[in-house]
Image (cartoon, rainbow, N blue to C red):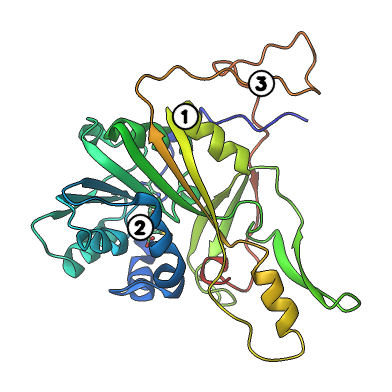
Amino acid sequence: MRPPHPGRARTHARRPSTSWDHVASWYDRLVGDEGSDYQRHVIIPAALRLLNPQPGETFLDLCCGQGVLARALLDSSAKRVVGVDASPKLIDAARARGSDSRLSFIVRDVRRLGDLTSGEFDAAACLMSLHDVDDVDAALRGAAAALRVGGRLVLILMHPCFRVPRQSSWGWDDEKKTQYRRLDRYYSPMEIPISVHPGRTASPVTQYYHRPLSYYLNNLARAGLALSVCEELLTHRVASPGAHSRGENRAAAEFPVFLGLRAERVPAFAPPALARPTSAPANEPLRSDNPPTRPPLRRERSRRRENPRCRG
Ligand SMILES: C[S@@+](CC[C@H](N)C(=O)[O-])C[C@H]1O[C@@H](n2cnc3c(N)ncnc32)[C@H](O)[C@@H]1O
């Protein structure tokens, strides 16, 4: 089987924006000043741990939403924090929630960062958003260009191996008294609409792009970003007391909900040659400038009743 290709979808850069402008007020309320439950207990602490901010540093928050991470970074004595998001309404919300001379928010598509790509930032982060962007290649190359050599990029993602909207779920094995994670599909890239208010008619949707783990790792490498840390993040939630709680808590300690990655911009970058999978025909060249054809992106119809972004 061929690996999904690491993503050179230049044509995607002209596709419509995946901005959350149409759900901005809902998202701003969900996050509030301090962050949602998961942001406060898992996502922001992990992002700060991975970023390891130092006093006087400059930060770029990619797909910043209403600025929850950018505000947290000010506490680390940052010299400057710039948040960018494609949604003008979320940028307005970010400006309204955080006023500080070190903080600025810009409406910008991360697929085209423009004048932010001058290599001036010490660190950048993209929290819970890269799976909402159609062109990962453009976003990661832009992030790399925004960083100084040695600068860090931190990504927090829904864990692509265990959380595939509409394709993963929990199940209970009565015999083994075990909660298991069921995964119906994983390897195929999929475009999955997620209903903001599941069960309600005419609920707005946001687009989610599922890709397998190798897709993200290969795209980081192709953008000149060397992986230095990988943290698989478990939920902080505990099961309510009951017949299944022991099994549920054991499963919660086994199946991470989010994936945290830190990568550093390398000095000079030449795309690495891809190893030939043993199953590839011997005469087929596999080079990073001639990647294997990507499997077609599948479109999933939205029919789930819970918003997977908001659950464990
Ligand atoms: C799940 S929200 C996360 C926001 C924020 N990082 C947080 O943790 O609260 C995803 C964000 O990605 C933004 N976004 C999606 N596609 C984008 C793009 N191409 N360029 C910039 N922002 C984008 C959306 O507008 C939205 O604010």
Quadrant showing the C terminus:
bottom right
* Residue name at image x 79 percent, y 22 percent: 278
Query: Which residue is under mark 2?
Result: 48
Residue 69 lies, in percent from the top left, at 31, 60
Q: Quadrant of residue 188?
A: top right
Q: CA distance from mark 1 to mark 3?
A: 26 Å
Work out whether 52 lies above or below 134: below
Classify 10 Å Cα crowding around label 3: few (below 14), some (14-19), many (20 and above): few
> In the rendered view, would you say 10 is above or below 162?
above
Up-down relation of residue 145 to residue 231 (above or below): above
Provide the residue designation for mark 1.
Answer: 11
How many residues crowd mark 2 within 10 Å: few (<14), some (14–19), many (20+)? some
Q: Secondary structure at mark 1?
A: helix
Asked if disc 1 is less than 8 Å from ligand 1, the answer is no
N-terminal-most mark, 3 or 2: 2
In percent of width and height, residue 66 lies at 29, 63
Category of crowding for the residue at label 1, using alpha-carbon neighbours closer than 10 angstroms: few (below 14), some (14–19), many (at least 20): few
Would residue 70 appear left or right of 255 to someone viewing this image? Answer: left
Name the kind of residue labelled 3 in the image.
Ala
* Secondary structure beneath label 3: loop
Q: What residue is disc 3 on? A: 275
Q: Nearer the viewer, mark 2 or mark 1?
A: 2
Towards the viewer: 157 or 112:
157
Give the residue displayed 47% in from the left and 51% down from the top.
132
Alpha-carbon span between mark 2 and mark 1: 34 Å
